[in-house]
Amino acid sequence: MHFTALLLTLLLDRLRPVAPAEALLASLRNGLAVLARATWAGEAHNPWLALALVGVPLIVLASFLRGLLGGFGLVLDIVVLLLVARVAEVLQWADRLARALDEGRDGGAGDLLRESPLPIPSVPTQPAARARVAIEVLLLTMHRRLFAPVLWYVLLPGCIGPLAYLFVTLVHEAWTRPDAPPPYAEAARRLLRWVDWLPARATALAIAVVGNFEDAVYAWRQQAGNWTVEEEGAILASAAGALGVPLGDPRRATPEFAGEPSGDDTAATTVRSAAGLVWRAIVLGFAALLLLGVGRVVG
């Protein structure tokens, strides 16, 4: 069932319009931001009460609906996965950015970076730096929209896993805004670290397997702890070793596993290599799910 649901999700994701899902998620983020301001009463436990107020009924309702649907629960799984796994637009964005770098269109590459799926503090001017930022955005977005939700989909019953992960990411985005009370921001960061601890390491391992394994593992062990968010550090350090390029703060990359790209063509090729790495990780995940399904049938 997992294999079928994910295959249908990726096929439908390439066909469905993006705007309705993004508008719905934006409304949910705004609602969670309003909830934070409405429930803040100066107590440290207020963020966790707010989370329970919304999260528990959401999970209970999803469990009830899936049980009610019975054999048609797969439909609900696909609907939730379509809401979470918005990956076609990310891969298309990376491809357009690679073409802009390849053709030397600085203005087009800069505009694409400003419209990136993840917010970036500033847009670099050098092609090599732009390629690094694009790879970071691509990897972290694919992790949050596909790899992490899929892992929780496998580990928890039905759509509960990806729905809970989506809820946590929305809470993190809403409660880390500048206007959110500080205890809410800290609670959101802590919650995201909890639910991302295992998926981040699974993503880093998949990247190492489909890339340069030895260098990826070396970079992961040496660099992951240098990032402010260690879960992001595990993914980016593993990818830096797998691709042989510096990611994140260039001072954290060493010549043993990272080389500095030079020139527009190299920058575009690096972005395409990262996209290829993502596709190989997706194929690896599908192969693992297929073998798991066959094992269950045979067993």
Image (spheres, rainbow, N blue to C red):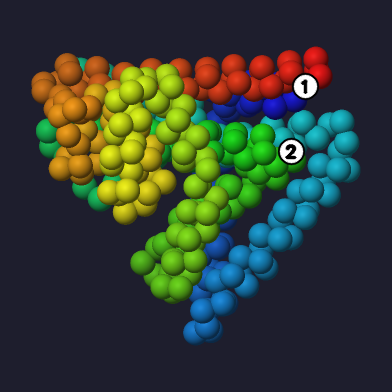
Residue bearing the label numbered 2: 158
Residue at (70, 42) in percent of width and height: 156
Residue 125's disc is: none
Q: Residue at the bottom extreme?
A: 42
Task: Name the amino acid type tagged 1.
Answer: Arg
- Report the mark closest to the observer, 2 or 1: 1
Judging from the image, what secondary structure is the residue with disc 1 in? helix
Left or right of 222 in this view: 295? right
Percent position of residue 172, x then y: 48, 57
Q: Quadrant of the C terminus?
A: top right
Left or right of 138 in this view: 62? right
Residues under labels 2 and 1: Cα distance?
Answer: 16 Å
Depth check: give the residue in front, 231 or 37.
Answer: 231
Residue bearing the label numbered 1: 296
Circle 1 Cα neighbour tier, 10 Å, few/some/many (<14 / 14–19 / ≥20) = few
Percent position of residue 285, x then y: 56, 23
Task: Name the amino acid type tagged 2.
Answer: Gly
Which picture quadrant has residue 234?
top left
Whether the residues at callouts 2 and 1 have beta carbons within 8 Å, the answer is: no
Judging from the image, what secondary structure is the residue with disc 2 in? loop
Depth check: give the residue in front, 199 or 181.
Answer: 199
